[in-house]
C-alpha cells in the first residue's frame, strides 16, 4: 500500500505540473489510495509506461503554431461529464480544460460532489464549474494584457445541457439546479 501511495503521489506531481492529459486517470487512481489492489498498481504502471512514451515531448506556448479550433490569444474550453461511472458510490466524473494558443493552461478532472440524477444535470454542473474557471481566466487574461474581445467558446456534448443553458426551461426535476442554470444563462446573455 505504501508503495502504491508513493507512486501515485509522484504521478500526481507530474500530472499537476506538466502533463494535464493525465488528470482523469490520476483522478481515478487516487480514489483507491487507502485500499489499492494489485490491479490498481497495474493501472498505475500503465500510466508510467505512457509517460515513458511521451518523455521527448515538450510543452509549447507558441502563438505561431496555433491551428483550428484555436485562435491566437483566445481562451477556448472543453467540458465533459461521465454519469455514474464510479461503481462504488455511483458518483460521476467531470472534467474541463481551458486552452490558449494550443496549450492547456487550466484543467480539472474530479468526482462530482453531488450525485447527478441525469446526464443533463451532471453536464450542467460540470459546465457551471467550467464557467467559473472561464470568468477567472478572462480576468487573468485582462491583467496580463490580452483581453478577450469576443465570448469564450465552450464545447460540450450534451444537447439537453446546452438547451437548458440557452433557454432555461426549468421543470420539476431541474428546479434544484436553478442557481447553476441562472449563472450560466447570465454569462451567455452577457456574451
Image (cartoon, rainbow, N blue to C red):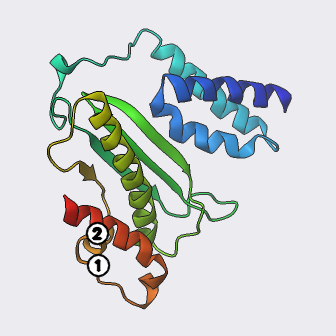
Rendering quarter of residue 164 = bottom left
Q: Nearer the viewer, residue 43 or 166?
A: 166
> Is 132 displayed left or right of 143 in the figure?
right
Q: Residues within 10 Å of mark 1 (few under 14, many from 20)?
A: some
Q: Report helix, strand or loop for mark 1.
A: loop
> Is 119 displayed left or right of 114 in the figure?
left
> Is 84 displayed left or right of 160 in the figure?
right
Residue 168: mark: 1
Please state the horizontal and vertical placement of residue 14, each as a whole percent of the image.
Answer: 57, 23
Residue 97: mark: none
* Residue shown at the point (82%, 43%) measured from the top left: 34
Please state the horizontal and vertical placement of residue 26, each as a whole percent of the image.
Answer: 59, 37
Tell me, yes or no, whether the two marked residues, 2 and 1, touch with CB atoms within 8 Å: yes
* Residue placed furthest toward the top: 56
* Residue shown at the point (56%, 49%) measured from the top left: 110
Q: Nearer the viewer, residue 90 or 168?
A: 168
**Cα–Cα gap, marks 2 and 1:** 7 Å
Q: Which residue is mark 2?
A: 185
Q: Residues within 10 Å of mark 2 (few under 14, many from 20)?
A: some
Rendering quarter of residue 162 = bottom left
* Residue shown at the point (30%, 19%) measured from the top left: 61
Amino acid at each position: 500500500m505504501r508503495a502504491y501511495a508513493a507512486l501515485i503521489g509522484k504521478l500526481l506531481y507530474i500530472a499537476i505540473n506538466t502533463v494535464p492529459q493525465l488528470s482523469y486517470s490520476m483522478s481515478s487512481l487516487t480514489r483507491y489510495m487507502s485500499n489499492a489492489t494489485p490491479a490498481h498498481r497495474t493501472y498505475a504502471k500503465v500510466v508510467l509506461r505512457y509517460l515513458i512514451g511521451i518523455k521527448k515531448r515538450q510543452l509549447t506556448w507558441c502563438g505561431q503554431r496555433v491551428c483550428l479550433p484555436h485562435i491566437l490569444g483566445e481562451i477556448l474550453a472543453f467540458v465533459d461529464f461521465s454519469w455514474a461511472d464510479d461503481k462504488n458510490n455511483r458518483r460521476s466524473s467531470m472534467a474541463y480544460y481551458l486552452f490558449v494558443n494550443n496549450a492547456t493552461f487550466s484543467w480539472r478532472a474530479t468526482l462530482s460532489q453531488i450525485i447527478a440524477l441525469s446526464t443533463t444535470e451532471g453536464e450542467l454542473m460540470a459546465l457551471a464549474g467550467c464557467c467559473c474557471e472561464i470568468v477567472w481566466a478572462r480576468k487573468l487574461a485582462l491583467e496580463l494584457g490580452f483581453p478577450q474581445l469576443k465570448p469564450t467558446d465552450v464545447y460540450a456534448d450534451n444537447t439537453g445541457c446546452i438547451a437548458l443553458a440557452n433557454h432555461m426551461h426549468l421543470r420539476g426535476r431541474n428546479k434544484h439546479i436553478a442557481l447553476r442554470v441562472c449563472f450560466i444563462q447570465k454569462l451567455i446573455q452577457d456574451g
